[in-house]
Image (spheres, rainbow, N blue to C red):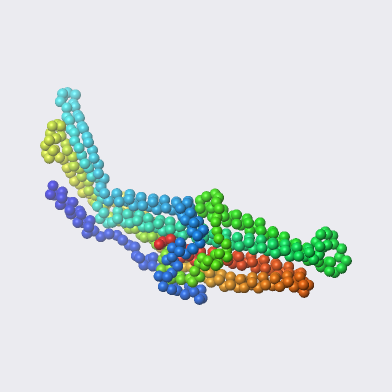
Amino acid sequence: MNKIFNVIIGVIIATISSCSINTYDPALTTIDVTCYRLPDSMHLVNDSTSMALMLWQDYYSDYYLHNLIDSAISRNLSLHNAILQVNKAESYISRSNGSFLPNVNLSIYQNQMKVSRNPSAYNMHGVGLGISDWEIDMWSRLRNAKKSKIEALMKEQAVMQSVKVKLIADVATLYYRLVGLDAKLKAINEMITMNQHYLHELGSRYPQSLSNKEVSFSTVAVGRSALAIEQAKAELYRSKSLKPRIENDIFITENAINLLLSRSEGEIERIDIEQVVTSNSFNDTIDIGIPAHLISYRPDVIAAEYAVREAFAIKDAASAAMYPRITISGNLATEESLYGSWKNFPTSVVYNLFAGLTQPLFRKKELKHDLRIKEITTHQKVADFKQTLLKACIDVSNVLANYKTNREVIANMAKRYDALFNAYTFSRQLNLTNRADYIDVLAAQGQLLNARMELSDAMIAYYTNRVAIYRVLGGGAML
Protein backbone atom coordinates (compact mmCIF):
# COMPACT_ATOMS: atom_id res chain seq x y z
CA MET A 1 0.00 0.00 0.00
CA ASN A 2 2.86 2.39 0.74
CA LYS A 3 4.19 1.93 -2.77
CA ILE A 4 0.78 2.81 -4.20
CA PHE A 5 0.56 5.98 -2.14
CA ASN A 6 4.08 6.94 -3.17
CA VAL A 7 3.14 6.57 -6.84
CA ILE A 8 0.01 8.69 -6.41
CA ILE A 9 1.87 11.39 -4.48
CA GLY A 10 4.59 11.45 -7.14
CA VAL A 11 2.03 11.91 -9.88
CA ILE A 12 0.33 14.76 -8.01
CA ILE A 13 3.65 16.52 -7.44
CA ALA A 14 4.51 16.13 -11.11
CA THR A 15 1.15 17.56 -12.09
CA ILE A 16 1.49 20.59 -9.84
CA SER A 17 5.01 21.30 -11.03
CA SER A 18 4.25 20.73 -14.71
CA CYS A 19 4.41 23.69 -17.05
CA SER A 20 1.20 24.65 -18.82
CA ILE A 21 0.85 25.74 -22.42
CA ASN A 22 -0.56 29.24 -22.76
CA THR A 23 0.31 31.32 -25.83
CA TYR A 24 -2.32 34.07 -25.68
CA ASP A 25 -0.86 37.58 -25.60
CA PRO A 26 -3.21 40.33 -24.30
CA ALA A 27 -1.44 42.81 -26.58
CA LEU A 28 -3.24 41.19 -29.53
CA THR A 29 -6.55 42.68 -28.39
CA THR A 30 -5.32 46.02 -27.09
CA ILE A 31 -7.54 48.92 -28.17
CA ASP A 32 -5.77 51.77 -29.92
CA VAL A 33 -6.82 55.05 -28.29
CA THR A 34 -6.31 56.94 -31.57
CA CYS A 35 -8.49 54.64 -33.65
CA TYR A 36 -11.10 57.24 -34.62
CA ARG A 37 -11.41 60.94 -35.20
CA LEU A 38 -13.95 63.38 -33.82
CA PRO A 39 -15.82 66.10 -35.72
CA ASP A 40 -14.92 69.69 -35.01
CA SER A 41 -16.33 71.12 -31.75
CA MET A 42 -16.73 67.62 -30.25
CA HIS A 43 -14.46 67.20 -27.23
CA LEU A 44 -13.40 64.26 -25.11
CA VAL A 45 -14.27 64.20 -21.44
CA ASN A 46 -13.44 61.96 -18.52
CA ASP A 47 -15.15 58.59 -18.98
CA SER A 48 -16.76 58.82 -15.55
CA THR A 49 -19.36 61.15 -17.10
CA SER A 50 -19.61 59.34 -20.43
CA MET A 51 -23.06 58.44 -21.73
CA ALA A 52 -21.60 54.98 -22.44
CA LEU A 53 -21.90 54.35 -18.69
CA MET A 54 -25.57 55.33 -18.54
CA LEU A 55 -28.32 52.75 -18.19
CA TRP A 56 -30.92 52.88 -20.93
CA GLN A 57 -33.55 53.70 -18.28
CA ASP A 58 -31.62 56.89 -17.53
CA TYR A 59 -30.88 57.77 -21.13
CA TYR A 60 -34.50 57.50 -22.30
CA SER A 61 -36.88 59.44 -20.09
CA ASP A 62 -40.05 58.70 -22.08
CA TYR A 63 -42.50 56.64 -20.00
CA TYR A 64 -44.14 55.01 -23.03
CA LEU A 65 -40.77 54.10 -24.52
CA HIS A 66 -39.73 52.51 -21.22
CA ASN A 67 -42.78 50.25 -21.36
CA LEU A 68 -42.07 49.23 -24.94
CA ILE A 69 -38.41 48.42 -24.23
CA ASP A 70 -39.29 46.43 -21.10
CA SER A 71 -41.85 44.46 -23.08
CA ALA A 72 -39.39 43.83 -25.91
CA ILE A 73 -36.68 42.59 -23.52
CA SER A 74 -39.08 40.14 -21.88
CA ARG A 75 -40.80 38.95 -25.08
CA ASN A 76 -38.40 39.25 -28.02
CA LEU A 77 -37.63 35.83 -29.52
CA SER A 78 -34.18 36.74 -30.85
CA LEU A 79 -33.07 37.83 -27.40
CA HIS A 80 -34.62 34.69 -25.93
CA ASN A 81 -32.57 32.54 -28.32
CA ALA A 82 -29.41 34.44 -27.38
CA ILE A 83 -30.11 33.74 -23.70
CA LEU A 84 -30.59 30.04 -24.50
CA GLN A 85 -27.23 30.08 -26.29
CA VAL A 86 -25.64 31.40 -23.09
CA ASN A 87 -27.28 28.59 -21.12
CA LYS A 88 -25.90 26.09 -23.60
CA ALA A 89 -22.39 27.50 -23.15
CA GLU A 90 -22.76 27.16 -19.37
CA SER A 91 -23.68 23.49 -19.84
CA TYR A 92 -20.51 22.93 -21.86
CA ILE A 93 -18.45 24.25 -18.95
CA SER A 94 -20.19 21.90 -16.52
CA ARG A 95 -19.50 19.02 -18.86
CA SER A 96 -15.82 19.95 -19.19
CA ASN A 97 -15.44 19.83 -15.40
CA GLY A 98 -16.12 16.11 -15.57
CA SER A 99 -13.06 15.52 -17.74
CA PHE A 100 -10.83 16.10 -14.70
CA LEU A 101 -12.48 13.26 -12.78
CA PRO A 102 -11.77 9.56 -13.25
CA ASN A 103 -14.23 7.10 -14.71
CA VAL A 104 -15.43 5.13 -11.68
CA ASN A 105 -17.35 1.88 -12.19
CA LEU A 106 -19.09 -0.18 -9.53
CA SER A 107 -19.60 -3.87 -10.34
CA ILE A 108 -21.21 -6.79 -8.51
CA TYR A 109 -20.47 -10.14 -10.06
CA GLN A 110 -21.13 -13.85 -9.65
CA ASN A 111 -19.11 -16.41 -11.61
CA GLN A 112 -19.92 -20.13 -11.61
CA MET A 113 -18.04 -22.83 -13.50
CA LYS A 114 -18.81 -26.59 -13.45
CA VAL A 115 -17.04 -29.42 -15.27
CA SER A 116 -19.33 -32.24 -16.42
CA ARG A 117 -17.08 -35.01 -15.16
CA ASN A 118 -16.49 -33.28 -11.84
CA PRO A 119 -19.48 -33.00 -9.53
CA SER A 120 -17.99 -30.03 -7.69
CA ALA A 121 -18.56 -26.49 -8.99
CA TYR A 122 -16.33 -23.43 -8.92
CA ASN A 123 -18.05 -20.32 -7.53
CA MET A 124 -16.60 -16.84 -7.40
CA HIS A 125 -18.46 -13.68 -6.35
CA GLY A 126 -17.57 -10.20 -5.20
CA VAL A 127 -17.94 -6.43 -5.38
CA GLY A 128 -15.54 -4.28 -7.38
CA LEU A 129 -14.76 -0.59 -7.71
CA GLY A 130 -12.73 0.36 -10.78
CA ILE A 131 -10.99 3.50 -12.02
CA SER A 132 -10.17 3.64 -15.73
CA ASP A 133 -8.13 6.09 -17.81
CA TRP A 134 -7.84 8.90 -15.28
CA GLU A 135 -5.77 11.40 -17.22
CA ILE A 136 -3.26 13.49 -15.28
CA ASP A 137 -3.31 16.91 -16.92
CA MET A 138 0.44 17.27 -17.27
CA TRP A 139 0.40 19.69 -20.23
CA SER A 140 -2.84 21.56 -19.44
CA ARG A 141 -4.76 19.94 -22.28
CA LEU A 142 -7.85 19.57 -20.12
CA ARG A 143 -7.40 22.95 -18.49
CA ASN A 144 -7.13 24.69 -21.86
CA ALA A 145 -10.15 22.78 -23.13
CA LYS A 146 -12.13 24.02 -20.13
CA LYS A 147 -10.72 27.51 -20.58
CA SER A 148 -11.96 27.54 -24.17
CA LYS A 149 -15.47 26.74 -22.89
CA ILE A 150 -15.25 29.59 -20.36
CA GLU A 151 -14.12 32.03 -23.06
CA ALA A 152 -16.95 30.75 -25.27
CA LEU A 153 -19.41 31.47 -22.46
CA MET A 154 -18.09 35.01 -22.08
CA LYS A 155 -18.34 35.46 -25.84
CA GLU A 156 -21.95 34.26 -25.89
CA GLN A 157 -22.81 36.59 -23.03
CA ALA A 158 -21.36 39.50 -25.01
CA VAL A 159 -23.29 38.38 -28.10
CA MET A 160 -26.45 38.28 -26.01
CA GLN A 161 -25.74 41.80 -24.78
CA SER A 162 -25.17 42.87 -28.38
CA VAL A 163 -28.58 41.51 -29.32
CA LYS A 164 -30.06 43.38 -26.36
CA VAL A 165 -28.35 46.64 -27.35
CA LYS A 166 -29.64 46.33 -30.91
CA LEU A 167 -33.13 45.49 -29.68
CA ILE A 168 -33.26 48.55 -27.41
CA ALA A 169 -31.95 50.77 -30.23
CA ASP A 170 -34.42 49.36 -32.77
CA VAL A 171 -37.39 49.91 -30.45
CA ALA A 172 -36.29 53.48 -29.66
CA THR A 173 -35.60 54.28 -33.32
CA LEU A 174 -39.01 53.04 -34.46
CA TYR A 175 -40.70 54.79 -31.55
CA TYR A 176 -39.25 58.18 -32.43
CA ARG A 177 -39.95 57.55 -36.11
CA LEU A 178 -43.57 56.93 -35.13
CA VAL A 179 -43.65 60.16 -33.12
CA GLY A 180 -42.18 62.01 -36.11
CA LEU A 181 -44.77 60.51 -38.46
CA ASP A 182 -47.49 61.67 -36.07
CA ALA A 183 -46.04 65.16 -36.37
CA LYS A 184 -46.12 64.93 -40.18
CA LEU A 185 -49.72 63.72 -40.11
CA LYS A 186 -50.65 66.57 -37.78
CA ALA A 187 -48.98 69.02 -40.15
CA ILE A 188 -50.86 67.59 -43.13
CA ASN A 189 -54.18 67.88 -41.30
CA GLU A 190 -53.42 71.47 -40.33
CA MET A 191 -52.46 72.31 -43.90
CA ILE A 192 -55.65 70.72 -45.23
CA THR A 193 -57.66 72.85 -42.80
CA MET A 194 -55.78 75.98 -43.89
CA ASN A 195 -56.35 75.16 -47.58
CA GLN A 196 -60.03 74.53 -47.00
CA HIS A 197 -60.37 77.79 -45.10
CA TYR A 198 -58.62 79.71 -47.85
CA LEU A 199 -60.76 78.05 -50.52
CA HIS A 200 -63.85 78.96 -48.51
CA GLU A 201 -62.71 82.58 -48.42
CA LEU A 202 -62.23 82.62 -52.18
CA GLY A 203 -65.66 81.07 -52.61
CA SER A 204 -67.19 83.80 -50.50
CA ARG A 205 -65.51 86.45 -52.60
CA TYR A 206 -66.12 84.79 -55.98
CA PRO A 207 -69.22 82.55 -55.59
CA GLN A 208 -69.92 82.46 -59.33
CA SER A 209 -66.45 81.15 -60.13
CA LEU A 210 -66.70 78.46 -57.45
CA SER A 211 -70.16 77.15 -58.37
CA ASN A 212 -69.97 77.11 -62.18
CA LYS A 213 -67.95 74.45 -63.93
CA GLU A 214 -67.82 76.55 -67.07
CA VAL A 215 -66.86 80.14 -66.38
CA SER A 216 -67.37 82.92 -68.87
CA PHE A 217 -64.17 84.92 -68.94
CA SER A 218 -66.01 88.17 -69.62
CA THR A 219 -63.53 90.15 -67.62
CA VAL A 220 -59.98 89.74 -66.48
CA ALA A 221 -61.12 89.77 -62.84
CA VAL A 222 -63.50 86.84 -63.39
CA GLY A 223 -60.83 84.82 -65.14
CA ARG A 224 -58.27 85.47 -62.44
CA SER A 225 -60.73 84.53 -59.70
CA ALA A 226 -61.55 81.24 -61.44
CA LEU A 227 -57.86 80.49 -61.84
CA ALA A 228 -57.23 81.27 -58.18
CA ILE A 229 -59.98 78.92 -57.04
CA GLU A 230 -58.81 76.02 -59.22
CA GLN A 231 -55.24 76.38 -58.06
CA ALA A 232 -56.42 76.53 -54.46
CA LYS A 233 -58.32 73.29 -55.07
CA ALA A 234 -55.19 71.72 -56.56
CA GLU A 235 -53.18 72.71 -53.50
CA LEU A 236 -55.86 71.23 -51.25
CA TYR A 237 -55.84 67.93 -53.13
CA ARG A 238 -52.06 67.89 -53.01
CA SER A 239 -52.19 68.07 -49.23
CA LYS A 240 -54.87 65.39 -49.08
CA SER A 241 -52.84 63.08 -51.34
CA LEU A 242 -49.98 63.09 -48.82
CA LYS A 243 -52.17 61.99 -45.93
CA PRO A 244 -52.74 58.30 -46.95
CA ARG A 245 -49.02 57.77 -47.42
CA ILE A 246 -48.24 59.10 -43.95
CA GLU A 247 -51.01 56.95 -42.45
CA ASN A 248 -49.60 53.91 -44.26
CA ASP A 249 -46.09 54.63 -42.92
CA ILE A 250 -47.54 54.85 -39.40
CA PHE A 251 -49.31 51.51 -39.86
CA ILE A 252 -46.12 49.80 -41.09
CA THR A 253 -44.00 51.31 -38.30
CA GLU A 254 -46.48 50.11 -35.67
CA ASN A 255 -46.24 46.61 -37.17
CA ALA A 256 -42.44 46.77 -36.99
CA ILE A 257 -42.58 47.64 -33.28
CA ASN A 258 -45.07 44.83 -32.63
CA LEU A 259 -42.70 42.43 -34.37
CA LEU A 260 -39.91 43.41 -31.97
CA LEU A 261 -42.36 42.80 -29.14
CA SER A 262 -43.10 39.33 -30.63
CA ARG A 263 -46.78 40.00 -31.09
CA SER A 264 -48.97 40.37 -34.16
CA GLU A 265 -50.80 43.51 -33.10
CA GLY A 266 -51.22 45.93 -30.25
CA GLU A 267 -51.62 49.61 -29.55
CA ILE A 268 -48.43 51.64 -29.48
CA GLU A 269 -48.88 54.41 -26.94
CA ARG A 270 -46.70 57.45 -27.51
CA ILE A 271 -46.36 61.14 -26.81
CA ASP A 272 -46.61 64.12 -29.14
CA ILE A 273 -43.50 65.49 -30.86
CA GLU A 274 -43.93 68.82 -29.05
CA GLN A 275 -43.84 66.98 -25.73
CA VAL A 276 -40.65 65.22 -26.77
CA VAL A 277 -38.97 68.53 -27.49
CA THR A 278 -40.27 70.40 -24.45
CA SER A 279 -39.66 67.52 -22.03
CA ASN A 280 -35.98 67.38 -23.09
CA SER A 281 -36.02 63.61 -23.53
CA PHE A 282 -32.32 63.73 -24.33
CA ASN A 283 -29.57 65.70 -22.72
CA ASP A 284 -28.05 67.73 -25.55
CA THR A 285 -24.65 67.78 -23.89
CA ILE A 286 -22.72 64.87 -25.41
CA ASP A 287 -20.19 63.42 -22.97
CA ILE A 288 -18.70 60.69 -25.08
CA GLY A 289 -15.75 59.65 -22.90
CA ILE A 290 -12.18 58.80 -23.75
CA PRO A 291 -11.69 56.67 -26.90
CA ALA A 292 -10.27 53.46 -25.42
CA HIS A 293 -12.96 53.13 -22.77
CA LEU A 294 -15.65 54.24 -25.19
CA ILE A 295 -14.95 51.43 -27.66
CA SER A 296 -14.36 48.85 -24.94
CA TYR A 297 -18.00 49.04 -23.81
CA ARG A 298 -19.31 47.76 -27.14
CA PRO A 299 -20.57 44.17 -26.86
CA ASP A 300 -19.42 43.28 -30.38
CA VAL A 301 -15.85 44.31 -29.53
CA ILE A 302 -16.02 42.34 -26.28
CA ALA A 303 -17.37 39.28 -28.11
CA ALA A 304 -14.60 39.53 -30.71
CA GLU A 305 -11.96 39.67 -27.95
CA TYR A 306 -13.34 36.58 -26.23
CA ALA A 307 -13.45 34.81 -29.60
CA VAL A 308 -9.68 35.40 -29.84
CA ARG A 309 -9.15 34.05 -26.33
CA GLU A 310 -11.29 31.01 -27.09
CA ALA A 311 -9.34 30.27 -30.29
CA PHE A 312 -6.00 30.43 -28.44
CA ALA A 313 -7.26 28.12 -25.69
CA ILE A 314 -8.42 25.60 -28.29
CA LYS A 315 -5.06 25.84 -30.06
CA ASP A 316 -3.18 25.32 -26.80
CA ALA A 317 -5.28 22.24 -26.06
CA ALA A 318 -4.47 20.88 -29.54
CA SER A 319 -0.77 21.55 -28.93
CA ALA A 320 -0.88 19.71 -25.59
CA ALA A 321 -2.53 16.73 -27.29
CA MET A 322 0.76 16.01 -29.08
CA TYR A 323 2.58 15.37 -25.78
CA PRO A 324 2.50 12.07 -23.88
CA ARG A 325 -0.54 11.41 -21.73
CA ILE A 326 -0.28 9.94 -18.25
CA THR A 327 -3.29 7.93 -17.19
CA ILE A 328 -4.09 5.97 -14.04
CA SER A 329 -6.27 2.91 -13.88
CA GLY A 330 -6.99 0.65 -10.94
CA ASN A 331 -9.38 -1.75 -9.31
CA LEU A 332 -10.41 -2.48 -5.75
CA ALA A 333 -12.54 -5.60 -5.34
CA THR A 334 -13.48 -8.49 -3.08
CA GLU A 335 -13.18 -12.03 -4.35
CA GLU A 336 -14.53 -14.97 -2.40
CA SER A 337 -15.63 -18.48 -3.26
CA LEU A 338 -17.76 -18.88 -0.14
CA TYR A 339 -20.29 -16.40 1.19
CA GLY A 340 -19.23 -17.17 4.69
CA SER A 341 -15.69 -15.94 3.97
CA TRP A 342 -16.89 -12.35 3.59
CA LYS A 343 -16.52 -11.88 7.30
CA ASN A 344 -12.76 -11.96 6.68
CA PHE A 345 -13.11 -8.88 4.51
CA PRO A 346 -9.52 -7.59 4.74
CA THR A 347 -8.12 -10.91 3.53
CA SER A 348 -10.50 -11.01 0.55
CA VAL A 349 -9.56 -7.66 -0.98
CA VAL A 350 -7.92 -7.66 -4.39
CA TYR A 351 -6.48 -4.42 -5.75
CA ASN A 352 -4.27 -3.19 -8.55
CA LEU A 353 -3.03 0.18 -9.77
CA PHE A 354 -1.68 0.95 -13.20
CA ALA A 355 -0.09 4.16 -14.43
CA GLY A 356 0.38 4.43 -18.18
CA LEU A 357 2.34 6.77 -20.42
CA THR A 358 0.84 7.07 -23.89
CA GLN A 359 2.56 8.85 -26.76
CA PRO A 360 0.59 9.22 -30.01
CA LEU A 361 2.56 7.80 -32.93
CA PHE A 362 0.38 6.94 -35.90
CA ARG A 363 -1.98 9.87 -35.11
CA LYS A 364 0.94 12.29 -34.96
CA LYS A 365 0.35 13.60 -38.48
CA GLU A 366 -3.36 14.00 -37.84
CA LEU A 367 -2.71 15.91 -34.62
CA LYS A 368 -0.11 18.07 -36.34
CA HIS A 369 -2.52 19.09 -39.08
CA ASP A 370 -5.23 19.69 -36.49
CA LEU A 371 -2.88 22.00 -34.61
CA ARG A 372 -2.08 23.84 -37.83
CA ILE A 373 -5.79 24.40 -38.46
CA LYS A 374 -6.23 25.74 -34.93
CA GLU A 375 -3.29 28.13 -35.46
CA ILE A 376 -4.86 29.46 -38.65
CA THR A 377 -8.13 29.93 -36.78
CA THR A 378 -6.39 32.06 -34.15
CA HIS A 379 -5.00 34.33 -36.87
CA GLN A 380 -8.48 34.63 -38.36
CA LYS A 381 -10.00 35.56 -35.00
CA VAL A 382 -7.32 38.20 -34.40
CA ALA A 383 -8.06 39.68 -37.83
CA ASP A 384 -11.79 39.58 -37.06
CA PHE A 385 -11.17 41.45 -33.81
CA LYS A 386 -9.18 44.16 -35.56
CA GLN A 387 -11.87 44.49 -38.23
CA THR A 388 -14.60 44.71 -35.58
CA LEU A 389 -12.59 47.34 -33.72
CA LEU A 390 -12.02 49.35 -36.89
CA LYS A 391 -15.72 49.20 -37.77
CA ALA A 392 -16.62 50.31 -34.24
CA CYS A 393 -14.30 53.30 -34.55
CA ILE A 394 -15.81 54.29 -37.90
CA ASP A 395 -19.34 53.86 -36.50
CA VAL A 396 -18.64 56.21 -33.62
CA SER A 397 -16.97 58.79 -35.85
CA ASN A 398 -19.81 58.73 -38.41
CA VAL A 399 -22.60 58.89 -35.85
CA LEU A 400 -21.02 61.81 -34.02
CA ALA A 401 -20.55 63.65 -37.33
CA ASN A 402 -24.19 63.00 -38.26
CA TYR A 403 -25.33 64.27 -34.88
CA LYS A 404 -23.40 67.51 -35.30
CA THR A 405 -24.82 67.99 -38.80
CA ASN A 406 -28.41 67.21 -37.77
CA ARG A 407 -28.35 69.79 -34.98
CA GLU A 408 -27.23 72.50 -37.39
CA VAL A 409 -29.80 71.46 -40.00
CA ILE A 410 -32.68 71.47 -37.50
CA ALA A 411 -31.74 74.90 -36.16
CA ASN A 412 -31.83 76.42 -39.65
CA MET A 413 -34.96 74.52 -40.72
CA ALA A 414 -36.86 75.72 -37.67
CA LYS A 415 -35.98 79.32 -38.51
CA ARG A 416 -36.96 78.73 -42.15
CA TYR A 417 -40.31 77.32 -41.13
CA ASP A 418 -41.03 80.30 -38.85
CA ALA A 419 -40.18 82.71 -41.69
CA LEU A 420 -42.39 80.85 -44.18
CA PHE A 421 -45.27 80.73 -41.72
CA ASN A 422 -45.02 84.50 -41.30
CA ALA A 423 -44.84 84.90 -45.09
CA TYR A 424 -47.96 82.79 -45.53
CA THR A 425 -49.83 84.81 -42.90
CA PHE A 426 -48.81 88.09 -44.50
CA SER A 427 -49.70 86.92 -48.01
CA ARG A 428 -53.21 85.94 -46.93
CA GLN A 429 -53.79 89.26 -45.18
CA LEU A 430 -52.54 91.21 -48.19
CA ASN A 431 -54.58 89.09 -50.58
CA LEU A 432 -57.79 89.67 -48.65
CA THR A 433 -57.24 93.41 -49.01
CA ASN A 434 -56.31 93.06 -52.71
CA ARG A 435 -52.76 94.16 -52.07
CA ALA A 436 -51.18 90.79 -52.97
CA ASP A 437 -51.90 88.30 -55.72
CA TYR A 438 -53.40 84.84 -55.03
CA ILE A 439 -50.25 83.35 -56.55
CA ASP A 440 -48.32 84.64 -53.58
CA VAL A 441 -50.71 82.88 -51.18
CA LEU A 442 -50.50 79.54 -53.03
CA ALA A 443 -46.73 79.75 -53.29
CA ALA A 444 -46.48 80.47 -49.56
CA GLN A 445 -48.78 77.52 -48.81
CA GLY A 446 -46.68 75.12 -50.85
CA GLN A 447 -43.43 76.30 -49.36
CA LEU A 448 -44.86 76.12 -45.84
CA LEU A 449 -46.01 72.53 -46.34
CA ASN A 450 -42.66 71.47 -47.75
CA ALA A 451 -40.83 73.16 -44.88
CA ARG A 452 -43.05 71.44 -42.32
CA MET A 453 -42.41 68.01 -43.89
CA GLU A 454 -38.66 68.61 -44.10
CA LEU A 455 -38.56 69.79 -40.50
CA SER A 456 -40.40 66.63 -39.37
CA ASP A 457 -37.96 64.45 -41.33
CA ALA A 458 -35.05 66.32 -39.77
CA MET A 459 -36.49 65.75 -36.30
CA ILE A 460 -36.85 62.02 -37.03
CA ALA A 461 -33.24 61.92 -38.24
CA TYR A 462 -32.09 63.83 -35.14
CA TYR A 463 -33.72 61.47 -32.64
CA THR A 464 -32.70 58.44 -34.67
CA ASN A 465 -29.14 59.68 -34.53
CA ARG A 466 -29.34 60.23 -30.77
CA VAL A 467 -30.38 56.60 -30.42
CA ALA A 468 -27.51 55.58 -32.72
CA ILE A 469 -24.97 57.45 -30.56
CA TYR A 470 -26.06 55.50 -27.51
CA ARG A 471 -26.03 52.24 -29.47
CA VAL A 472 -22.50 52.64 -30.87
CA LEU A 473 -21.23 53.38 -27.36
CA GLY A 474 -22.54 50.05 -26.10
CA GLY A 475 -26.05 51.11 -25.13
CA GLY A 476 -25.50 50.67 -21.39
CA ALA A 477 -26.41 46.99 -21.62
CA MET A 478 -23.07 45.84 -20.17
CA LEU A 479 -23.69 47.56 -16.85
User: How far from the left and from the top, in percent, is residue 258?
Assistant: 54, 53
Does 297 sit left or right of 432 as displayed?
A: left
> Where is residue 128, by image quadrant?
top left
Does 58 sit left or right of 365 as displayed?
A: right
Q: Is residue 45 above or below residue 325?
A: below
Q: Give the residue at x 34% y 58%.
A: 313
> Where is residue 384, by image quadrant?
bottom left
- Residue nearest the observer in this picture, 2 or 205: 205
Q: Is residue 473 above or below residue 360?
A: below
User: How many numbered circles does the render carry?
Assistant: 0
Does 443 sit left or right of 31 as displayed?
A: right
User: How far from the left and from the top, in percent, is residue 404?
Assistant: 53, 72
Q: Give the residue at x 58% y 72%.
A: 411
Tell me if residue 311 can be seen: no
- Residue nearest the observer in this picture, 437 or 402: 437
Residue furthest to the right in view is 218
User: How far from the left and from the top, in percent, is residue 188?
Assistant: 66, 62
Q: Give the residue at x 12% y 49%.
A: 2
Q: Is residue 118 above or below residue 206?
A: above
Q: Give the residue at x 61% y 62%.
A: 183
Residue furthest to the bottom in view is 41
User: How far from the left and from the top, in percent, is residue 462?
Assistant: 55, 67
